[in-house]
Image (cartoon, rainbow, N blue to C red):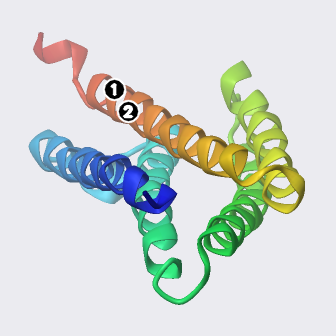
């Protein structure tokens, strides 16, 4: 059986979870009653990360399935991994710029670009040189890692949006 066929269910579940997290974030933002101007810089960064990482998880869970329609199996996984790693490198650079604008970035905000860049370089190396089974597994692990980041962003947004004066 095709490796991509075996991974289709996993990729579909990841895409569904990514859409769900992004959708619930919209609900949380709507329930706070805040306008974009009322969110502080850190809250806006959290919201951006949450939505962007959810979009990455959605997009990159679909790319192997699309590529497999026009490319051989091993090449579709490799191309997907190299695209994902390239976008990840660019995103880590933008994250460095965004966190540099924060007045007092947390330790997590300082370390996140380094971790992201390390994983992105790993994606590029694995995508270019590893056996195809490793490429597929690492690809799925990075998607799950991005879902975890989106989930943490959702939790941060949920708790940051609560007004302690109303509790």
Mark in front: 1 vs 2: 2
Q: Which residue is mark 1?
A: 155
Tell me: residue 145, above or below residue 106.
below
Per the image, label 2 sits on a secondary structure element best described as helix
Q: Residue at the spot x=61%, y=50% of the render?
A: 136
Please rate how many residues cluster around mark 1, counting C-alpha atoms within 10 Å: few if below 14, some from 14 to 19, many from 20. Answer: some
Residue 24, quarter of the rendered image: top left
Q: Which mark is residue 151?
A: 2
Q: Residue at the spot x=22%, y=24% of the render?
A: 162
Q: Residue 108 at x, y = what percent?
A: 67, 24
Q: Name the one closer to the observer, 148 or 31.
A: 148
Per the image, label 1 sits on a secondary structure element best described as helix
Q: Quadrant of the N terminus?
A: bottom left
Q: Residue 83 at x, y = what percent?
A: 69, 70
Residue 40, quarter of the rendered image: top left
Q: Is residue 112 left or right of residue 163?
A: right
Residue 56 shows in the view:
no
Q: Are marks 1 and 2 in contact (CB under 8 Å)?
A: yes
Residue 147 shows in the view:
yes
Q: Residue 35 at x, y = what percent?
A: 25, 56
Q: Name the one closer to the observer, 144 or 3.
A: 3
Q: Quadrant of the C terminus?
A: top left
Mark 1 to mark 2 CA distance (whole Å): 6 Å
Q: Is residue 151 left or right of residue 117?
A: left
Q: Name the one closer to the observer, 73 or 146.
A: 73
* Mark count: 2
Q: Which mark is residue 5?
A: none
Q: Residue at the spot x=52%, y=38% of the render?
A: 42
Q: Is residue 68 left or right of residue 126?
A: left
């Amino acid at each position: 059986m095709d490796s991509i066929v075996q991974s289709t269910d996993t990729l579909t579940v990841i895409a569904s979870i990514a859409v769900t997290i992004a959708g619930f974030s919209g609900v949380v933002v709507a329930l706070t009653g805040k306008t974009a101007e009322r969110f502080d810089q850190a809250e806006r960064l959290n919201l951006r990360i949450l939505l962007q990482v959810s979009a990455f998880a959605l997009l990159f869970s679909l790319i192997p399935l699309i590529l497999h329609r026009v490319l051989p199996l091993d090449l579709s996984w490799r191309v997907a991994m190299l695209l994902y790693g390239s976008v990840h490198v660019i995103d880590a650079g933008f994250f460095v710029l965004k966190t540099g604008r924060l007045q007092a970035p947390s330790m997590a905000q300082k370390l996140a670009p380094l971790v992201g860049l390390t994983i992105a370089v790993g994606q590029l190396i694995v995508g270019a040189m590893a056996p195809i089974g490793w490429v597929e597994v690492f690809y799925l692990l990075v998607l799950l890692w991005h879902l975890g980041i989106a989930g943490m962003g959702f939790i941060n947004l949920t708790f940051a949006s609560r007004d302690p004066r109303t509790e």
